[in-house]
Image: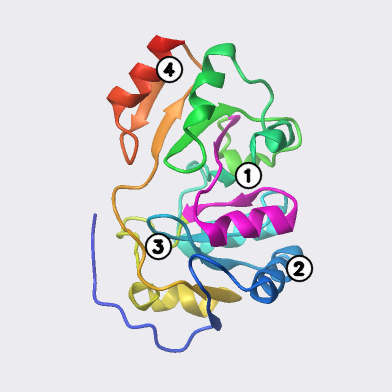
């Protein structure tokens, strides 16, 4: 992954937010931006992400444009809990239910997308990656917003994701509406991505949750 020197420079609205106990007023301000087709930089457990209303096609278009991301590459979404899955997922195979016990955080599970999910969000694949976040700020955002938001990393395609706001690319900072700065995050490899639209399931990327842990959960089931 490419890296290059970065300088925060002129940005949109940067708000310092407590990583463990976010101010409800800050969360509400961010939620209001999401509801107005805006775009946020916000913290997840390891890296900063770009968040928009996952059902707003214009906001999704902005994410692809900001990241310079191919339209054929889907974006994952964050949910407040398993109870929200029917909003974005067509069906949950029996064997996939075993993996949901690994939430919150750590694992992104790919399902067949529900009928209301914008095709642009899936990259035309008909599949949607879903995760329930563990970070208190990300968790508060999806809970207060009341619907799924995108959770893609806040980086230009082909460049490294970042664990600090100061390392965000200035091009991203200039184009978003709010940056929620929770300080230095844990960093690391990102979530493990598992496709459960097939059997055996496919681990597309091994990240925070090991492939062995995935196999162990499925075997015990």
Marks 4 and 2, how far apart in space? 37 Å
Q: Is residue 150 magenta?
A: yes
Q: Is residue 70 magenta?
A: no
In the picture, the disc for residue 79 is 1
User: Of helix, strand and loop, which one carries label 2?
Assistant: loop
For the residue pair 162 and 144, the one nearer the viewer reads as: 144
For the residue pair 59 and 134, the one nearer the viewer reads as: 134
What's drawn in magenta, residue-wise? 126-152
Q: Are marks 4 and 2 in contact (CB under 8 Å)?
A: no
In the picture, the disc for residue 36 is 2
- In this rendering, the label closer to the viewer, 1 or 3: 1
Marks 4 and 3, how far apart in space? 28 Å
Mark 3, residue position: 155
Residue drawn where x is 43% and y is 28% of the image: 194
User: Of helix, strand and loop, which one carries label 3?
Assistant: loop
Marks 1 and 3, how far apart in space? 21 Å
Q: Is residue 8 left or right of residue 221?
A: left
Q: Of the residues under marks 1 and 3, which one precedes in the sequence? A: 1
Mark 4, residue position: 201
Q: Of the residues under marks 2 and 1, which one precedes in the sequence? A: 2
- In this rendering, the label closer to the viewer, 4 or 1: 1
């Amino acid at each position: 992954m490419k890296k290059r020197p970065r300088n925060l420079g002129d940005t949109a609205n940067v708000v310092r937010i407590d990583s463990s106990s976010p101010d409800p007023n800050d969360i509400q301000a961010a939620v209001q931006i999401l509801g107005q087709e805006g775009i946020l930089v916000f913290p997840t457990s390891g890296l900063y992400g770009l968040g928009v209303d996952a059902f707003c096609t214009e906001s999704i278009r902005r994410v692809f444009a900001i990241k310079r991301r191919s339209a054929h590459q889907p974006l994952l979404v964050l949910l407040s809990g398993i109870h929200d899955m029917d909003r974005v997922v067509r069906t949950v195979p029996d064997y996939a239910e075993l993996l949901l016990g690994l939430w919150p955080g750590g694992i992104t599970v790919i399902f067949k997308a529900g009928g209301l999910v914008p095709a642009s969000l899936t990259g035309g694949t008909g599949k949607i990656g879903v995760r329930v976040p563990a970070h208190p700020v990300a968790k508060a955002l999806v809970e207060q917003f009341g619907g799924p938001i995108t959770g893609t990393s806040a980086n230009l395609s082909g460049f490294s994701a970042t664990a600090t706001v100061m390392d965000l690319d200035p091009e991203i900072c200039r184009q978003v509406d709010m940056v929620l700065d929770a300080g230095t995050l844990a960093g690391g490899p990102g979530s493990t991505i598992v496709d459960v639209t097939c059997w055996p399931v496919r681990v597309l990327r091994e990240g925070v949750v090991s492939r062995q842990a995935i196999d162990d959960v499925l075997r015990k089931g």
